Amino acid sequence: MTLGPDERVVPMRLQKFLARAGAASRRGSENLMTAGRVRVNGEVVTELGSKVDPAVDVVTVDGREVRLADEATYLILNKPAGYVTTMRDPGGRPCVAELVPIREHPGLFPVGRLDRDTTGLLLFTTDGDAAQRLLHPSFEKDKHYVALVRGRLAEAEARQLERGVTLDDGPCAPAAVELLERPRDTRPVAPRGVPEGMSVVGLTIHEGRKHQVKRMLEAVGHEVVALHRDTFGPLTLGDIKPGSWRELTETERRAVLAAAEGERAHG
Ligand code: URA
């Protein structure tokens, strides 16, 4: 089992706990500690590296207890190829549940799915209500994919995708299309640059139909050899290593919730 770098959710550093609990900023929390205003189980703790277990330790600031809000968890995984997007595979195939901290966050599940051979950004949450809104077909937030395809994508084919191709389950909305050449852009699907006789295509869509990107590229004559997603609405994968995850920052969490709220307003 591969664990993310931040798997050690429990115990956590006291200043992080204080900041998360809203006692002060991270720096302000350190100041509270060094000023001797913070107690853990009745003992003053001034050492900045000290850890607490939020489930059992009682933390006070100036005698008043501070607690973590019982917030939903949001995290993003850089899904490697070969993992099925499910929390349990009756067939025993490797599944994404093995890569995320389900013991610390019971109820965690993926928002949407990536194919077994697709890599990249997969959002997980314990917030079923927000997830439902983010999965609604009218959630029109951009998702950016990088695809390695057989053959050279012609200008006319790119224009066809931009106008919107029609698949067997109906027309697709127009996509934004770019031909990628620079190794730093092709890296997720072609680390050593674009192979001979192939293309790397950047595709932005806002729908989420089954195998949509593969089917769109096939509709213009190109088989997808590798597919990677690097953005999902307001979220960007960044440099999370394949198989690792991180929790959303407060800014990202707010952006996701705002996007989900927008969905409630429209839906
Ligand atoms: N489109 C696909 O074809 N596959 C994915 O995994 C995601 C989008």
Image: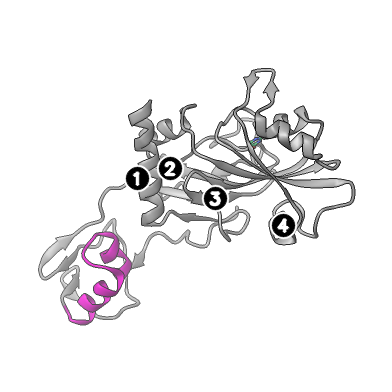
Please tell me whether mark 1 sits on a helix, a strand or a loop.
Answer: loop
Label 3 or label 4, whichever lies nearer to me, is 4
Distance Cα–Cα, label 4 vs label 2: 28 Å
Q: Residue flagged by tag 1: what amino acid is it?
A: Ala
8 up-or-down from 99: above or below: below
Is 129 contained in the magenta span? no
The percent coordinates of residue 155 (x first, y second) are: 78, 40
Q: Which mark is residue 187?
A: 4
For marks 3 and 2, the one nearer the N-term is: 3
The percent coordinates of residue 228 (x first, y second) are: 66, 46
Please say if the residues under marks 2 and 1 sit with CB atoms less than 8 Å apart: yes
Q: Residue flagged by tag 3: what amino acid is it?
A: Leu
Q: Say left or right for 199 vs 205.
A: right
Q: Which mark is residue 72?
A: 1
- In the picture as drawn, the residue positioned furthest to the left comes out as 63
For marks 3 and 1, the one nearer the N-term is: 1
Q: Which residues are magenta?
A: 14-36
Query: Is the stretch drawn in magenta largely helix, strand or loop?
Result: helix
Which residue corresponds to mark 3?
A: 77
For marks 4 and 2, the one nearer the N-term is: 2
Which residue corresponds to mark 2?
A: 125
Quarter the C terminus occupies? top left
Can residue 6 be seen in the rendering of this structure? yes
Q: Say left or right for 232 vs 163.
A: left
Can residue 211 be seen in the rendering of this structure? no
